[in-house]
Image: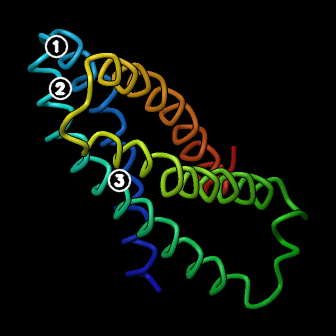
Amino acid sequence: MTYIRYLHVLAAAAWIGEVIVINFVLIPFVSSLSAETKKIVIQKLFPRIFRLASVLAATTAVCGYVYLFYIAKGNFSFLFNSQRGIFLFIGALLGTLLTLFHFFMENKMAHKIGISDEKEEMIDDIHLRLKIVPRVGLLVITTIFICMMISVRGL
């Protein structure tokens, strides 16, 4: 189980790192490009970023749940009987919701990005979503990290 836990933490750290790079490096860079270059960069780069996020989100969630079921041994009452358990529950719930959002909503956006004959207005709409969605995602994933750190070590 140690390796499952390590893989969970490594995937989660890579996932938050990816979201940080998107927010503070890629989105500002794409914003500075001309319309035609922006279209090319969005179409070529962001589907790969979405695929990486899919792998990291799935790995984090699966390993997290495997480890949770291992430590719970069928009794999940500890999630509601202590402050640390409550933070673990909140982190797991938010992580699950963020993963589901990623697989259902972001994949729709990734599909739109992959269409080659998009009009400039659609590229601008996608670019606007690429500004908003990762910022909200960063807020949520940071909250998850804080909850998980509290659940492991306490306040």
Q: Residues within 10 Å of mark 2 (few under 14, many from 20)?
A: many
Q: Which residue is mark 1?
A: 35
Please tell me whether mark 3 sits on a helix, a strand or a loop: helix
User: Closest to the observer: 44 or 66?
Assistant: 44
Disc ID at residue 53? 3
Question: On the picture, is 20 further left or further right than 62?
Answer: left
Question: How far across and down, in percent of the image, does residue 124 sit?
Answer: 33, 17
Under mark 1, the amino acid is Ala
- Quote the CA–CA distance across marks 2 and 1: 6 Å
- Quote the CA–CA distance across marks 3 and 2: 21 Å
Q: State if disc 1 and disc 2 touch (CB < 8 Å).
A: yes
Question: How far across and down, in percent of the image, does residue 90 sit?
Answer: 73, 52
Q: Which residue is mark 2?
A: 39
Q: Residues within 10 Å of mark 3 (few under 14, many from 20)?
A: many
Question: How far across and down, in percent of the image, does residue 18 sit?
Answer: 30, 42
Q: Nearer the viewer, mark 3 or mark 2?
A: 2
Under mark 2, the amino acid is Lys
Task: Work out whether 38 lies above or below 9.
Answer: above
Residue at the (66%, 50%) spot, across then down? 94
Residue at the (70%, 57%) spot, across then down? 93
Quadrant housing residue 8: bottom left
Under mark 3, the amino acid is Ala
